[in-house]
Image (spheres, rainbow, N blue to C red):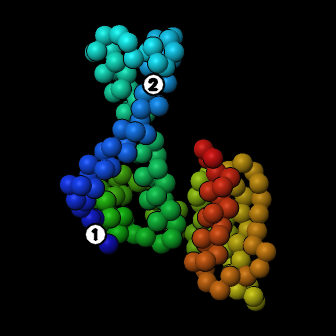
Amino acid sequence: MTTVEITAEESAELGRALVDALNPLAAAVRARGTGLTEELSWHGEPVEIALSVLSAWKLVDVEVKRLTALAAATAGSYGASYEQLGAAWGITRQGARKKWPEAVARAARPGVLELFGGTAELVEAEDGWRWSAVAADGTAGEAAAGYPSREEASAHAGAFLAARGEGS
């Protein structure tokens, strides 16, 4: 897989969507910082307002990095190599290993998914592939029946872990 560039129109649309998503967070951050209501918090020195928006973007940046690492770990849990992770991100294999040092190590245990703070084990049974899991919130779960493929069982186990995972 190689990285895909976006068009100028897609970039503009993404920018608008990100700003729309950021505005409520920026307003809340600004209000907490000033002690004013969200509506009144935008009245003030332009530099202070701009710095509040910058602070909100920093919060978004931290969350994007967390979600990026989670996506890399998910790909690694499905067997992606550092070379593949690097190609998807547009960096070298070594760069991917440095950026996400745990991503491929998670795939070192065949049949185990470590996602969203939980762990699922996949096993092949007489009726197909089954999973059993413990989510980040401590909830245990398992497949009610076998699935025709490891991938399908993995998808269901991953959905279980995501629904009860970190930050849900």
Q: Residue at x 32, y 64 (%)?
A: 88
Q: Residue at x 72, y 58 (%)?
A: 134
The dot on residue 149 is none
Left or right, 45 with respect to 159, comes to left
Q: Give the residue number, with chain letter if any, for mark 1.
A: 2
The dot on residue 27 is 2
Left or right, 52 with respect to 103, comes to left
Which of the two residues, 160 or 99, is positioned nearer the viewer here? 160
Q: Residue at x 63, y 63 (%)?
A: 159
Coordinates of residue 30 in the picture (x, y in percent): 44, 19
Work out whether mark 1 precedes mark 2 in sequence or the reverse, and give the earlier one: 1
Disc 1 residue type (three-letter):
Thr
Which of the two residues, 64 or 115, is positioned nearer the viewer here? 64
Confirm whether residue 124 shows in the render: no
Disc 2 residue type (three-letter):
Ala
Left or right, 125 with respect to 29, comes to right
In the rendered image, the quadrant that contains the N terminus is: bottom left
